[in-house]
Amino acid sequence: MKFLHLSDTHYLDNYQGEFEVFGIDYEPHEKLFHALVTFDFNSVDFVVNTGDLIHDGGVEDYQALDRILRSYMPKDMPLYYVLGNHDNKAAFYQALYGKEADEGLNYVVDFQGYRLIILDTAEQSRHHGIISKELEAWLADQLAKPSEKGTLLFHHHPLLIGWEPGVIETEISDSYLDLLEESDVRGIFTGHLHENRHAMVRNIPQHTAASLAFGLEQVGDVAFFTDQLGYSVVEVNDETIDVFTKTTNPITERYKQQRL
């Protein structure tokens, strides 16, 4: 099984200088379109976007992003969404489900023998993530019975790491870590940090994908916003999880073609 892991697209139909606060005077539409048009969607089984789908926008922005992503994908390819701290739950549900709701987006998908679990670690107007006791209990119910080939978790905020040493981006309990350790979870996939990161969470590999809107780099106690963008392609089989990270901006030059 192979999937495309996008994150932190921060899409807006019209940015109107929205990113000037980051010292970035540009609109990343062109960068997003370049990544999509150059990717071979026939090489993967599904696509997942791990949150901050849009940048504090509304219904029209969610509809536009969904329309854009699907226009590059094969018609029947699954597209799974995760909500992040810049997402508006009510606008998301109205845009994609046509219903009035303001609840967490938590769901389970059975895919080729694997169990995919999407968790909502975001609370409105809160930058950091949280696994509440209620969400922990819900996940425990889902994990009570092992799946055929194991479970993959997807949520926006990473576990046990942050931009700075000692700064944790997701509030969790020790019992939550025990739950993961004793379960059939084989991998955790997140976003939020706007950079490719790899960590172990109780011996479970966690991959954090780069952003397709803007990058972040921490040097000491200073954070820099950058134009480094990317995504990840993940291949999972019975024995391994192979994560290939792709930098889409700055654009990589290709010089000589060689058959492998």
Image (cartoon, rainbow, N blue to C red):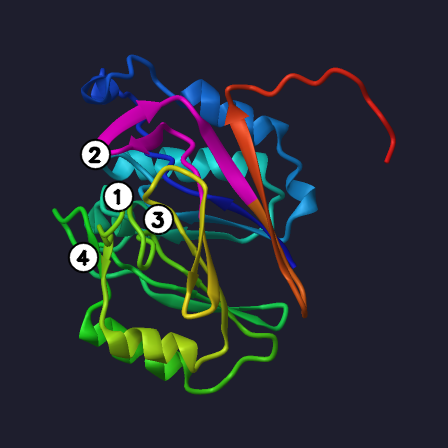
Left or right of residue 251: residue 156: left
Question: Tag 2's secondary structure?
Answer: loop
Depth check: 184 or 4 in front? 184
Q: Nearer the viewer, mark 4 or mark 3?
A: 4
Question: Tags 2 and 4 in contact by the CB under 8 Å rule?
Answer: no
Residue occupying the far right of the picture: 259
Q: Which residue lies under the disc numbered 2?
A: 221
Q: Which residue lies under the disc numbered 4?
A: 102
Dominant secondary structure (helix, strand or loop) of the stretch shown in magenta: strand
CA separation in Å, label 2 and label 3: 39 Å
Q: Position of residue 44 (x, y in %)?
A: 64, 48
CA separation in Å, label 1 and label 3: 35 Å
Q: Earlier in the sequence, mark 1 or mark 3?
A: 3
CA separation in Å, label 2 and label 4: 36 Å
Residue 96 image label? 3
Name which residue type carries label 4: Asp
Mark 4 residue crowding within 10 angstroms, few (<14) / some (14–19) / many (20+): some
Name which residue type carries label 1: Glu
Q: Which residues are magenta?
A: 208-232
Q: Nearer the viewer, mark 2 or mark 3?
A: 2
Q: Is residue 225 magenta?
A: yes
Rendered view: 25 above or below 81: above
Q: Earlier in the sequence, mark 2 or mark 1?
A: 1
Residue 139 visible within the image = no
Residue 99 visible within the image = yes
Name which residue type carries label 3: Leu
Q: Earlier in the sequence, mark 4 or mark 1?
A: 4
Residue at (22, 21) in percent of width and height: 18
Q: Earlier in the sequence, mark 2 or mark 4?
A: 4
Question: Tags 2 and 1 in contact by the CB under 8 Å rule?
Answer: yes
Q: Earlier in the sequence, mark 2 or mark 3?
A: 3
Q: Which residue lies under the disc numbered 1?
A: 164
